[in-house]
Image: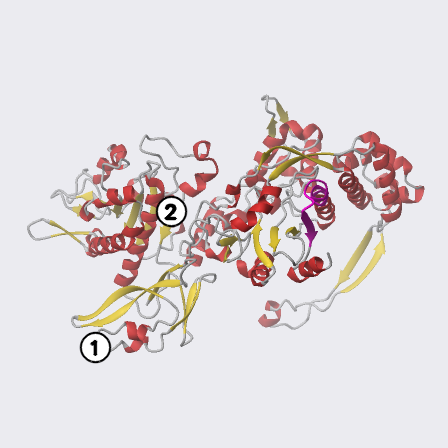
């Protein structure tokens, strides 16, 4: 039994495509059927007057779980999508691979058809005879993989025909099945295809090869007039064959332990495709859609996890010479270029400035690793110029940071193609109830802030005098002893040493051995204030507070920056004023343009789209729990998860509230922003920035959107308590 795609619809209960065996007069044969909860495979495998197959007794479909991508039967068996259950012959496995490749091909082809981009799929096979054989008279006949391909192609096409767009369906109907696939192999002197292991120039081969044809006529292959779309090959790696429009690769052979060969096979499809005019479909043309269009699907006999693990391990090994840390040494000696082409060689001082600036921006962490915040800002194109003298070279510095090898990026390079898909996420009937609120909040605004420098200086002086908590530099000594007798289990459990004894003491910092600090410069750079303002703050604090600098300079600088930023954010939020400007957000920002995997998609009934796409998997998402509470609350009329393309401008960066909720009449105020704050790598600075953004959002609502209430809550219960207290 094989579980295929899970299908979801707003009008129907979930269904899953199951393939299983059925008894027939001519013997047992395989069938596919869309099944729902309650279906019994034992009964479905029967064919009157023959009873059902005993192997399916007890296989009553109990639950279809799209979020975990599996189905559960009443007998306790759990089957995951894309995996075979029970005995499976090689032919059954290959048939499934071929079918999944055809399904993926047609889905991709329909998406690219109107763009004039030809879609090709490549099958790697062990032996030519599995695709093409010869009758005694020399007539070519299909081998078993070729025969299965034609059977499955016809079957899939019949199933999908009603859902295909008319123009694309007509295109497919014009191509006979035997013309839609072909094989490219070495050819012997009798014109028969042979495995490419046969050396050219030997007695059994000549230099003629179908590869010559495809290399010479690549333009023909990429035209829609050429019917060939599926290519079977024994030696595409050996012969150096390449084509930019390979979107599916299927390995109809036993997986190899040769990681290099695996990467080379995948590499046959890692090309930027071209359209019928030969124009390469790159980022300059497609913008954000470049990764969606140029996506490769690999269909292999391996499980997804093992395939990805092996491939990522090989990629990691091939990138071993790339830097892995964005430390000072990484930037030292590099050449930066500004927008006018002027160059700057990074010396030790500049390298240190760049490194510390990126840490303060939280673009690298304490271990010199690239952070999620940098990747987010880079993806949203919201990277801000670096301060001071580094500003003209910001783009060049960010390019260097992008070049640091980040292992976490590999985790996002591939996704499981068997993950269930939902349809494009369009606005639903709930948007009519949400529309009055949307008309209010879609307006765009600009802000102004006005506070005196002296007010900021005075506030910072009070904060530093009251809140500086500087610990003296300490040392810790830990002492332990290795056990005299050990066995392997002790070593394995890391118990080879006795418990450590520790003692601590204070380090006296002698002035002659202390490094020299540019205290004004460090504080000015960290707070984006002028050196004059910073000097006024330091001159105004008490001698006792300033003396703490000598106790622990680094901690003094770090705390002082945080406290000054806190006061700066507070003054900004107290004096900010918003005014409407010309421009408004479009409702299109809510619509997902691509199918989304169900591990991050939550089916809803009150949301303005049928699904909510979470930032992480549903199981680990706080947002998902809150959304489920909204779904179950009678007082909630409708709601929206606000996308990042909707934002409130603030002096400390763009701010996007998490939710917009509309409550029913008679319960409380009708319209609400609900904001859920998120964690950060550096909690101290993050708190001040987030609090400033929240204060700005509160100011916007009170000044320009009095009908909209803004609040910050941890969960739905606290939100309800807030509503009832209004």
Residue at left offset 34%, top offset 73%? 40
Where disc 2 sits, the SS reads helix
* Residue 272 x/y as whole percent: 39, 37
Q: Residues within 10 Å of mark 2 (few under 14, many from 20)?
A: some
Quadrant, the N terminus: bottom left
Which of discs 1 and 2 lies nearer the camera? The answer is: 1
Asked if residue 424 is positioned above or below residue 303 in the image, the reply reads above
| Front in this rendered view, residue 486 or 264 | 264
- Specify the label residue 50 is tagged with: 1
Specify whether residue 322 is painted magenta: no
Q: Which residues are magenta?
A: 696-712
Contact flag, marks 1 and 2 (Cβ < 8 Å): no
Residue at left offset 61%, top offset 21%? 342
Specify whether residue 709 is painted magenta: yes
Q: Quadrant of residue 527?
A: top right
Q: Which residue is mark 2?
A: 266
Q: What distance separates the C-alpha of mark 1 from that of mark 2?
A: 46 Å
Task: In the displayed orientation, state which residue is furthest to the left.
Answer: 137
Q: Residues within 10 Å of mark 1 (few under 14, many from 20)?
A: few
| Front in this rendered view, residue 20 or 470 | 20
* Residue 228 x/y as whole percent: 23, 42
Quadrant, the C terminus: bottom right
Q: Quadrant of residue 454?
A: top right
Q: Is residue 371 visible?
A: no
In this picture the colour scheme is secondary structure
Asked if residue 669 is positioned above or below residue 386 in the image, the reply reads below
Q: Quadrant of residue 451?
A: top right
Residue at left offset 21%, top offset 75%? 48
* Residue 516 x/y as whole percent: 81, 36
* Residue 538 x/y as whole percent: 87, 37
């Amino acid at each position: 039994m094989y579980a295929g795609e899970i299908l979801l619809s707003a009008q129907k209960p979930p269904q899953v495509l199951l393939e299983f065996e059925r008894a027939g007069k001519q013997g047992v044969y395989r069938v596919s059927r869309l099944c729902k909860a309650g279906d019994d495979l034992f009964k479905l495998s029967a064919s009157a007057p023959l009873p059902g197959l005993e192997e399916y007794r007890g296989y009553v479909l109990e639950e279809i779980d799209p979020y975990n991508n599996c189905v559960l039967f009443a007998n306790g068996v759990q089957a995951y999508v894309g995996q075979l259950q029970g005995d499976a012959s090689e032919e059954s496995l290959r048939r499934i691979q071929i079918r999944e490749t055809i399904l993926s091909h047609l889905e991709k082809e329909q998406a690219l058809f109107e763009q004039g981009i030809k879609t090709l799929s490549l099958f790697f096979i062990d032996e030519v005879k599995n695709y093409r054989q010869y009758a005694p008279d020399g007539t070519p006949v299909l081998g078993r993989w070729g025969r299965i391909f034609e059977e499955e192609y016809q079957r899939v096409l019949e199933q999908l025909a009603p859902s295909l767009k008319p123009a694309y369906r007509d295109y497919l109907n014009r191509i006979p099945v035997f013309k839609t696939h072909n094989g490219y192999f070495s050819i012997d002197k009798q014109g028969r295809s042979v495995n490419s292991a046969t050396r050219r120039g030997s007695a059994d081969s000549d230099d003629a090869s179908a590869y010559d044809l495809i290399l010479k006529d690549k333009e023909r292959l990429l035209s829609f007039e050429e019917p060939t779309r599926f290519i079977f090959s024994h030696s595409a790696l050996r012969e150096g064959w390449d084509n930019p429009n390979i979107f599916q690769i299927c390995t109809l052979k036993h997986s190899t332990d040769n990681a290099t060969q695996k990467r080379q096979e995948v590499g046959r499809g890692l090309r930027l495709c071209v359209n019928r005019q030969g124009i390469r479909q790159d980022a300059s043309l497609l913008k954000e859609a470049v990764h969606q269009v140029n996506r490769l699907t690999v269909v292999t006999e391996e499980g997804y996890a093992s395939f990805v693990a092996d491939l990522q391990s090989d990629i990691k090994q091939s990138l071993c010479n790339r830097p892995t840390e964005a430390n000072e040494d990484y930037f030292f000696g590099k050449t930066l270029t500004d927008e006018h082409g002027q160059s700057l060689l990074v010396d030790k001082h500049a390298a240190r400035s760049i490194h510390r600036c990126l840490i303060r921006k939280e673009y690298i962490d304490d271990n010199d690793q690239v952070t999620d915040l940098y990747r987010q800002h880079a993806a949203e194109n919201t990277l801000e110029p670096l301060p001071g003298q580094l500003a003209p070279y910001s783009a060049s510095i960010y390019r260097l940071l992008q070049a640091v090898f980040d292992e976490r990026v590999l985790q996002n390079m591939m996704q499981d193609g068997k993950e269930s898909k939902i349809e494009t996420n369009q606005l639903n009937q709930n948007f009519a109830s949400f529309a009055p609120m949307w008309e209010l909040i879609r307006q765009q605004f600009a802000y102004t802030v006005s506070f005196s420098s002296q007010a900021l200086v005075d506030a910072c002086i009070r904060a530093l005098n009251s809140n500086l908590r500087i610990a003296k530099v300490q040392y810790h000594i830990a002492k332990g002893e290795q056990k005299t007798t050990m066995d392997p289990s002790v070593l394995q459990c890391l118990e080879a040493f006795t418990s450590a004894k520790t003692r601590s003491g204070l380090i006296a910092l002698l002035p002659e051995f202390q490094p020299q600090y540019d205290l004004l410069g460090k504080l000015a750079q960290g707070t984006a204030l002028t050196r004059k303002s910073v000097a006024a703050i330091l001159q105004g604090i008490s001698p006792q507070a300033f003396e703490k600098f000598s106790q622990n300079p680094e901690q003094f600088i770090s705390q002082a920056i945080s406290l000054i930023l806190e006061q700066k954010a507070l003054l900004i939020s107290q004096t900010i004023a918003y005014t409407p400007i010309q421009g408004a957000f479009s409702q299109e920002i809510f619509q997902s343009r691509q199918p989304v995997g169900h591990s991050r998609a939550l089916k809803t009934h009150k949301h303005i789209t049928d699904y909510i796409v979470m930032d992480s998997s549903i199981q680990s998402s706080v947002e998902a729990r809150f959304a489920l509470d909204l779904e179950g609350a009678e007082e909630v009329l409708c709601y929206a998860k606000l996308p990042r393309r909707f934002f409130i401008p603030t002096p400390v960066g763009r701010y996007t509230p998490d939710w917009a909720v509309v409550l029913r009449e008679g319960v409380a105020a009708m319209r609400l922003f609900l904001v859920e704050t998120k964690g950060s790598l550096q909690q101290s600075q993050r708190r001040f920035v987030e609090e400033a953004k929240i204060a700005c959002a509160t100011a916007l609502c009170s000044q320009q959107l009095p009908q909209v209430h803004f609040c910050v809550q941890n969960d739905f219960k606290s939100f309800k308590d807030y509503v009832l207290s209004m």
